[in-house]
Image: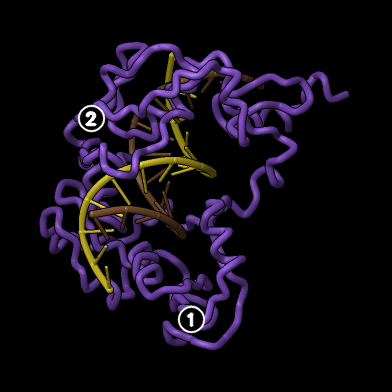
Chain colours: A purple, B brown, C yellow
Amino acid sequence: MPRSFLVKKYFTSKRPNYSELECQNDILPERYPLSELPGANSDFPVACFTAGLVWDVSLVPQLQGPASLSGLSSAQGPLDLSSPSSLSCSSSGEEDEGRTSDPPSPEPTDTYHPQQPRSRRGSKSKPRATEEQRETTVPTTRPPFFCKHCPKEYNSLGALKMHIRSHTLPCVCPTCGKAFSRPWLLRGHIRTHTGERPFSCPHCNRAFADRSNLRAHLQTHAEVKKYQCSTCSRTFSRMSLLQKHVSAGCPHSA
DNA sequence: CTGGGGAGGGGGCCC
DNA sequence: CGGGCCCCCTCCCCA
């Protein structure tokens, strides 16, 4: 979903790293929305094979791990259509536990359980390196914060609150009533109603409502794609395709 | 069956 | 501390 329809200020100290995307393509992204394409590393494709830019299937954890912890995908339970309240999200969502589609936590106790040590980081498949580092190098002195809806835990209240929104889904689409955890998810969803597609491909005429989808699309233009089979060296634009390739039995594996 | 688009979710970072 | 945005990932569906 458009996680990025919100035009943003680029040129700030922090820039999105699109080099990964574009380096495999030769054209400069003039039509890229927001003119944001990175200082285009128009490196040679091969140069992109650095630091894991091309995924080797051997490095991929067990395909399809517990990946889908997003039990919310079908979180379309009974929505509270009574108060669409435009695009605004009811910020008091943390309290109304009724809307979550997640099964209640086995331990429906309180939200915070300082002191109870549990496994850190209970979700994302691939934590960012910086965070990884931080966690290993900086001894966490603060007690973890536990979600009362699920077993997840966080080191900061802010992170926990953010997570809880995925249970309470305070942002409701005024058009169809679908609920989302964050305002920008809702705004992206609204694009599906309006048909707005601000992200156009610099290589073809296609346009997308979601930057992530454009990014995936750009892979289809790349000669050398991001995900590579360690056996036959064939590359794929998506992890899922690589997984299929492997599970279907790479012709070169036997 | 494969490749690709559409839609959505999550955590982290910066302001 | 919260909002906004980023990147990454996944699932579903269709050509």
Q: Do callouts 1 and 2 point to residues on the same chain? A: yes
Which quadrant holds the C terminus of chain A? top right
Residue A44, how many percent across, how many down?
Answer: 54, 16
Residue that appears at 25% across and 26% down: A35
Of A250 and A117, the residue lying toward us: A117
Question: Which chain is disc 1 placed on?
Answer: A
Which sits earlier in the primary sequence, circle 1 or circle 2? 2
Residue at left offset 44%, top offset 23%: A41
Q: Which residue is drawn at 21% across and 45% down?
A: A187
Q: Distance between the residues labelled 1 and 2?
A: 40 Å
Q: Label 2 marks which chain's residue?
A: A
Q: In which quarter of the image is residue A17?
A: top left
SS for callout 2: helix
At label 1, which amino acid type do we have? Arg
Residue identified by numbered label 2: A34
- Res A100 seen here: no
Q: In which quarter of the image is the N terminus of chain A?
A: top left
Residue A15: name its quadrant: top left
Where A133 falls versus A189 (above or below)?
below
SS type, badge 1:
loop
Q: Is residue B10 above or below residue A151?
A: above
Query: Crowding near pointer 1: few (<14 within 10 Å), some, many (20+)?
Result: few
The quarter of the displayed image where residue A217 is located: top left
